[in-house]
Amino acid sequence: MNFYFAPMEGITGYIYRRAYHSCFYPMDKYFTPFIAPKQDKTLNSKEKNDILPEHNEGMRVVPQILTNRAEDFIRTAEKLREFGYQEVNLNLGCPSATVVSKKKGSGFLGEREALDRFLENLFENLSMDISIKTRLGMDEPEEFYRLLEIFNKYPLKELIIHPRVQADYYRNSPDRKVFADALKISRNSVVYNGDIFSEGDYEQFTASFPETGAVMLGRGILANPGLPGRLCGKKQPSKQEIKQFLDRLVQDYREVLSGERDVLFRMKELWFYLGFLFTNPEKYVKKIKKAQRLCDYEEAVRTLFREQELAENGAFRPSV
């Protein structure tokens, strides 16, 4: 089984990827948070820093592009090829209302004829590997069967399926019946993404779909960066190893961000997930989120690590 790191806007940029890759079980592919092409036709400094080869050494990184304009996708992909990339990924999965209202991300799934023309243009004019990360449709899972007819017309590098519709956001359970059909019908290699948060989740999935060659993990890794290693038979990282990883993140963010508040924001966002890894984390995570200074944040984290242990089955669990 191959393991891919899902793109998560604001969290899994190169600072996080680089620290994760050096501290924990390496992923087979890392997908970047999406690049949204702009009118000035250039990558902004954040986007450029995220894809610079020197910021991603030793990792197989796939940049993701969010657009519904073929010319913008092609131009951005050509720019990325100048940096050495041979594969780019089309985002058809983002469920954000602001993105969907522009008919981008999963909003593009509701425009099947336009999507077909878009893909035809890409494959006629771009000599790079193209993968797609998609949802099942806008409102109903049955929409995916017609979408799959479109995807099957093109030689995708991979089709990464998050089996929810846009209207679900991250609610409800992934529709694995439709995923099972996709495995049978797709002419392209299929990758699964969605709600694998623990060894038990993974074992249940692989028992049902042993023919799947790759899975993409996102929130499960943010809550437990030791998860991919566990799925490959490795031991759970110790508290000390987790703490060293977090200390490195703080230090690396301090070197590139313009002040403590930006560093605090990044680390607090991560603790929405990391709290699941510990026994009785509530009051500590509350203090972390209330911290207004980096020294207060670091003291709250030290106290948590000193007074609590790693939970025996610590894993992300979405709120109902």
Image: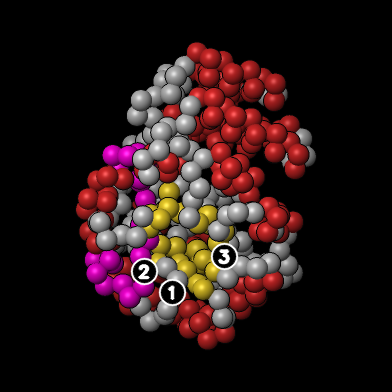
Q: Which mark is residue 65?
A: 3
Q: CA distance from mark 2 to mark 1?
A: 8 Å
Q: Which mark is residue 156?
A: 1
Residue 178 visible (yes or no): no
Q: Residue at x 68, y 67 (%)?
A: 83
Residue 157 x %, y %:
45, 71
User: Is there CB contact under 8 Å for labels 2 and 1?
Assistant: yes
Q: Residue at x 32, y 39 (%)?
A: 199
Q: Is residue 182 magenta?
A: yes
Residue type, mark 1 in image: Leu
Instruction: Tell me which segment is drawn in magenta.
Output: 181-201
Q: Which label lies toward us, 2 or 3?
A: 2
Q: Is 39 left, or right, of 218 in this rendering? A: right
Q: Which comes before the other along the chain, label 2 or label 1?
A: 1
Residue type, mark 3 in image: Ile
Q: Residues within 10 Å of mark 1 (few under 14, many from 20)?
A: some
